[in-house]
Image (cartoon, helix red, strand yellow):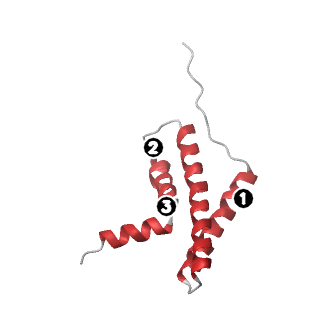
Amino acid sequence: MATAASKTIVHGNAYNIFIFVVTIVSLVIMVLLWLPFSAETKVLLGFYDNLVCAIFLADFFTNLKQAPSKRGSSSANAAGWICSARSQPSEALRAWRSCASPG
């Protein structure tokens, strides 16, 4: 009986550096959104925030599709779902917080 070879997800250094840079850009955008800028600047930062979120969502779903177990292992439960949470736009989180807060 032949067993199916399990896929292992191996990302190259360039990909890992790209995701690292996108993460740093995301953190900078998050800080900049808290600062008092003009409305036009806030719109531009919001666009970049959504673009970064789309990159993170694409990364998450690509890794999920290639994962040998969709239910998750200990690393997928600990880090994988955190990755999906980081991909939510700050506006969506702000709206969720306002709906979730009492009173």
Residue pointed to by mark 1: 17
The N terminus lies in which quarter of the figure? Answer: top right
* Label 3 SS: loop
Among numbered discs 2 and 3, the one appearing first in the sequence: 2
Q: Which residue is drawn at the image coordinates 55% and 49% (left, top)?
A: 60
Q: Is residue 2 above or below residue 95?
A: above
Query: Can you give x and y, in whole percent of width and height, for residue 100 in the image?
Result: 30, 69
**Label 1 – label 2 distance at C-alpha:** 25 Å
Residue pointed to by mark 3: 88
Q: Nearer the viewer, residue 39 or 10?
A: 39
Callout 2: 10 Å neighbours few (<14), some, many (20+)? some
Query: Can you give x and y, in whole percent of width and height, for residue 38 in the image?
Result: 59, 84
**Label 3 – label 1 distance at C-alpha:** 21 Å
Among numbered discs 1 and 2, the one appearing first in the sequence: 1
Outermost residue on the top side: it is 1
* Label 2 SS: loop
Outermost residue on the front side: it is 40
Q: Are marks 1 and 2 in contact (CB under 8 Å)?
A: no
Among numbered discs 3 and 1, the one appearing first in the sequence: 1
Residue pointed to by mark 2: 72
Outermost residue on the left side: it is 103
**Label 2 – label 3 distance at C-alpha:** 20 Å
Q: Picture quarter containing residue 7?
A: top right
The C terminus lies in which quarter of the figure? Answer: bottom left
Disc 2 residue type?
Answer: Gly
Disc 1 residue type?
Answer: Ile
Seen in the image, is 10 located left or right of residue 3? right
Q: Which residue is drawn at the image coordinates 49% and 55% (left, top)?
A: 84
Query: Can you give x and y, in whole percent of width and height, for residue 91 in the image?
Result: 47, 68
Disc 3 residue type?
Answer: Gln
